[in-house]
Image (cartoon, rainbow, N blue to C red):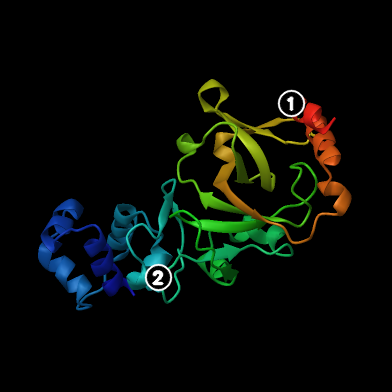
């Protein structure tokens, strides 16, 4: 796929063959020969194309990028991509769903296009533009979300775009996947502070270099109904009080 991929990537960047050749310090004719499949890039040239387009060599060689549109692959750091952004026949973005049984293996497959391509996909038309993925939630650390619910998150490419106090699905090299309220402490100690809404769980720090992916909460999908007692106002107030949230005005209304 290297010939068509070089041509497509150059077109996405709105570069002429001459401009790309100048950037890579080679002749325009060599770019033309690669794009027309009259010759194949050497290993050194493959590395140069990989560094220039910020794409792994195996993606350049084996994946048909011609169906991607500008921005449909996202750089993460400098050595891998989140790929692909899947679209349906109406050109609407599809959401990959990480199933509960496969969530443990997500740490090993998150940067593998074949693993991601095998995930089931859904479409939620009300989501904002961007790359989204749905993750299963385990435990009770982020009440009132139930165990087994799914959080749909929007991919955050740069940790500096993190907004303090919002909730994120965080993939870490040491602890795998967690869903927490996140606070940026990179300037202070090069860490993120992860906080559970359920105060029974203590906050903890994660080094910035341990963060592999960050997905900002967009919506949640409950897979089971709430029991009637869980929806009673008194139960809701008690739950929020346990989480340290003051609802004095609401309590007076109920009384």
Q: Position of residue 43 (x, y in %)?
A: 32, 64
Residue labelled with disc 2: 91
Q: Nearer the viewer, mark 1 or mark 2?
A: 1
Q: CA distance from mark 1 to mark 2?
A: 47 Å
Relative to 141, say whether 224 is above or below. Answer: below
Quick check: 44 left or right of 74?
Answer: left
- Tag 2's secondary structure? loop
Q: Is residue 211 visible?
A: yes
Q: Nearer the viewer, residue 96 or 92?
A: 92
Residue extending furthest toward the top: 188
Q: Quadrant of residue 110?
A: bottom right
Residue lying at 31% horizontally and 71% vertically, measured from the top left: 2
* Label pair 1/2, CB-CB below 8 angstroms: no
Q: Which mark is residue 249?
A: 1
Q: Quadrant of residue 19?
A: bottom left
Q: Nearer the viewer, residue 138 or 145?
A: 145
Q: Is residue 200 visible?
A: no
Q: Position of residue 169 (x, y in %)?
A: 62, 47
Q: Position of residue 253 (x, y in %)?
A: 78, 30
Residue lying at 54% horizontally and 67% vertically, measured from the top left: 123
Q: How many C-alpha atoms fall within 10 Å of the one at disc 2: few (<14), some, or many (≥20)?
A: few
Relative to 237, say whether 157 is above or below. Answer: below
Relative to 87, say whether 200 is above or below. Answer: above
Residue lying at 22% horizontally and 75% vertically, measured from the top left: 39
Q: Quadrant of the N terminus?
A: bottom left
Q: Nearer the viewer, residue 74 or 166?
A: 166
Quick check: 9 left or right of 245?
Answer: left
């Amino acid at each position: 796929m290297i010939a068509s991929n070089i041509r497509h990537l150059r077109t996405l960047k709105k570069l002429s063959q001459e401009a790309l050749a100048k950037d890579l310090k080679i002749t325009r004719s060599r770019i033309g020969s690669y794009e027309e499949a009259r010759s194949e890039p050497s290993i050194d040239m493959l590395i140069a194309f990989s560094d220039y387009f910020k794409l792994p060599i195996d993606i350049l060689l084996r994946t048909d990028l011609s169906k991607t549109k500008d921005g449909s692959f996202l750089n993460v750091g400098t050595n891998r991509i989140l790929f692909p952004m899947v679209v349906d026949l109406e050109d609407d973005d599809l959401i990959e769903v990480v199933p509960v049984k496969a969530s443990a293996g997500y740490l090993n497959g998150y940067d593998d296009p074949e693993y991601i391509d095998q995930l089931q996909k859904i479409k939620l038309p009300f989501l904002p533009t961007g790359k989204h993925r749905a993750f299963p939630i385990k435990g009770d650390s982020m009440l009132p979300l139930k165990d087994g619910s799914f959080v749909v998150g929007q991919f955050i490419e740069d940790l500096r775009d993190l907004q303090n106090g919002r909730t994120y699905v965080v993939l870490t090299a040491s602890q795998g996947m967690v869903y927490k309220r996140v606070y940026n402490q990179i300037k202070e100690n090069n860490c993120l502070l992860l906080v559970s809404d359920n105060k029974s769980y203590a906050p903890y720090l994660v080094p910035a270099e341990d963060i592999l992916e960050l997905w900002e909460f967009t919506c949640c999908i409950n897979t089971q109904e709430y029991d009637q007692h869980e929806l009673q106002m008194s139960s809701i107030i008690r739950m929020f009080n346990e989480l340290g949230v003051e609802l004095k005005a609401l309590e007076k209304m109920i009384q």
